[in-house]
Image (cartoon, rainbow, N blue to C red):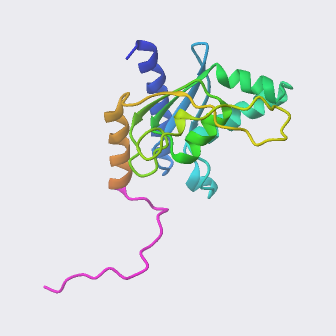
Amino acid sequence: MTAASAAFMERALEQAKFALDNLEVPVGCVIVEDGKVISSGSNRTNATRNATRHAEMEAIDILLREWQKMGLDQAQVADKFAGCDLYVTCEPCIMCATALSILGIREVYFGCANDKFGGCGSIMSLHQGSTSSDDLSGSQPPKPKGFKCTGGIMAGEAVALFKCFYEQGNPNAPRPHRPVRIPLQ
C-alpha cells in the first residue's frame, strides 16, 4: 500500500467515523482525481430515510451537481469519472458497484469485504462489467464498463467501526415482530 493510498483511506475512515457519530452505518468514501480528493461522502440512510443514500452515492451526487453547474455534458462527465478513483471503507454493495461501473470510475479501493451485499467479489463481481456502449445520446440504457478493484486496505480499522456501531445498537433498526421471551428462573 502506498502512502497516498493510506492517506486517502484515512480520509474515507474519517467520513465513516462521521457517519458513526451520526448514528449511521459507518461507511465513508472519497473520490480522488489527479491525486486530490474532489468529493467525499458518508452513509445518510437513517437521516434521509432513503435506503439509496450510501456513502458512494452521496459523493457521486456532489460531483454530478458540481459538474452539471459547470455545464458538462454526459460525455464530459463520463470522461471525468474515467479519471477518478474511489476509496471506500467497505466493499461497495451491489447497487453502488453497479452505479460505479455504469459511471465508468477508473478504480475502487476498499477496506473490509461486504459478505452480505458485496458487489466487488464477495457476492457478485460487478466490477468486471461488460463491453461498454458508445451510444451517448441516451437512447440506450448505459452498459456497465467495469473497473479495477483492490480490497483489504485498512480493513481492520473499518471492521472496528462496524463493531462499535453494532455494539451500541442501531436505534433505527426495526423492532422485533415477536416479543422477546425471557426464560423463567
Magenta highlight: main SS: loop
Outermost residue toward the bottom in this view: 184
User: Is residue 138 shown left or right of residue 83?
Assistant: right
Q: For the magenta stretch, what is the residue range?
A: 168-185
* Residue at image point 36% right, 29% down: 154
Image vertical order of residue 117 relative to residue 159, above or below: below
Image vertical order of residue 68 relative to residue 93, above or below: above
Q: Residue 12: x and y, percent?
A: 49, 31
* Residue at image point 71% right, 22% down: 80
* Residue at image point 80% right, 32% down: 135
Image quadrant for the C terminus?
Answer: bottom left
On whether residue 178 falls in the magenta region, the answer is yes
Outermost residue toward the left in this view: 185
Q: Residue 74 is drawn in which quadrant?
A: top right
Image vertical order of residue 142 relative to residue 173, above or below: above
On whether residue 25 falls in the magenta region, the answer is no
Report the front residue among 134 and 161. Answer: 134
* Residue at image point 48% right, 22% down: 8
Q: Residue 106 is drawn in which quadrant?
A: top right
